[in-house]
Image: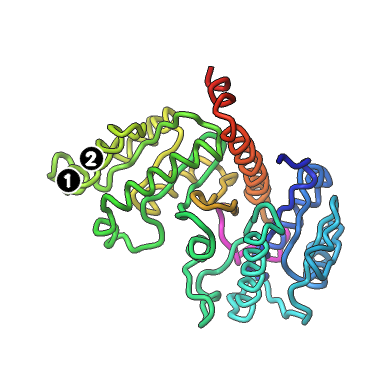
Amino acid sequence: MMKKAENIIVGISIGDLNGIGSEVILKTFDDSRMLELCTPVIFANVKVLSFIKKTLGLETNLHGIDQINQIVIGKINVLNIWKESVDLNFGTNDEEIGKYAIKSFVAATNALKENQIDVLVTAPINKYNIQSEDFKFPGHTDYLDKELDGNAMMLMVQDKLRVGLLTDHIPVNEVAKHLNEKLITQKVETIKQSLIQDFGINKPKIAVLALNPHAGDNGVIGKEDDEILKPILKKLFEKGTLVFGPFAADGFFGNGQYEKYDAVVATYHDQGLIPFKTLSFGNGVNYTAGLNKIRTSPDHGTAFEIAGKGVADFNSFKEAVYTAIDIYNSRNTYQEISKNPLKIKEKQL
């Protein structure tokens, strides 16, 4: 059932308190019109956020609550998940602060699993200071992949530009040995399903980038593209998935070829993220596709170098909120239509 906009509950994990996460969250909801689109719940502590707000000279009105069932529609709710004071030192990498980032994230994830919030938007964490005996994950995506149903896939989104990854946080010298039929098939089918249910594209076209320069140049610069990628993509295409490639990555973005496809799949992290961030101009969103719940985040990190100075650009975080809401509505529409095959037929006609 579709909710009224203001009744969509957007859960927000606070991220690293010494970074710019709190600032971009507060700036995003400083615009009262945002509360016409959703009701935010920030998993943190209202006294800490009030201190940050005062430090940055912001006027954002915060509403502290102690239980999730105390959410007030139309307010910026701050769920107090800890009571003690926290010593902040903007721009500093601090393991104690990392513990609060994870406390917020885990609590927000639990609320998402229990349907107490509709979507989750995560502020940036520091991947180093979050590590502990209780949390041994490289980042948000890996933890969500464990906690939620489905197969998580990083999908970077900015308007009609969507870039996914076959491999993400692994060393470049290990990429080739991770490429196999099971992985490639799973990632391509995940992104196909996401494009259909999350973005409303009935017959998505997907491009896959080659691992080697010039797609291996017929084996002169590597055989992986000819021996691994091409046969698997051909098999997927023959089964009805509109997947094309592998394409040489350099010219693919340079000549605007990416505009012909609904999504692009890169073989490794920087191959996809460098052109995406170049083209998205700070408005990109990191979406975790393939899961039964919705999570987005801005496409930047903690930015310690500017933390506490009040100069952080909040556009990417705002876009992450917009994207989460859009996907939530798109999924609901897809589920409603899918209940009645006749409506699907009518829509296609």
26 above or below 159? below
Is disc 1 surrounded by few (<14), some (14 to 19) or many (20+) residues within 10 Å? few
Main secondary structure found in the magenta portion? loop
Residue 224 appears left or right of 115: left
Q: Determine the secondary structure under disc 2.
A: helix
Provide the residue span drawn in magenta.
299-311
Residue 302 in percent (x, y) is at 59, 63
The reply to whether the C-beta atoms of the residues labelled 2 and 1 are less than 8 Å apart is yes
The residue where tag 2 is placed is: 230
Residue 247 appears left or right of 226: right
Residue drawn where x is 63% and y is 35% of the image: 336
Residue 42 in percent (x, y) is at 74, 62
Residue 99 in percent (x, y) is at 62, 77
Which residue occupies the foreground of this view, 65 or 167?
Answer: 65
Tell me, for residue 227, which label it has, or none.
Answer: 1
In which quadrant will I find the N terminus? Answer: top right
Residue drawn where x is 53% and y is 64% of the image: 147
Q: Quadrant of residue 235?
A: top left
How was this image coloured? rainbow
Which residue occupies the foreground of this view, 10 or 338?
Answer: 338
* Callout 1 amino acid: Glu
* Callout 2 amino acid: Lys
120 magenta-colored:
no
Residue drawn where x is 68% and y is 52% of the image: 118
307 magenta-colored:
yes
Residue 291 in percent (x, y) is at 52, 53
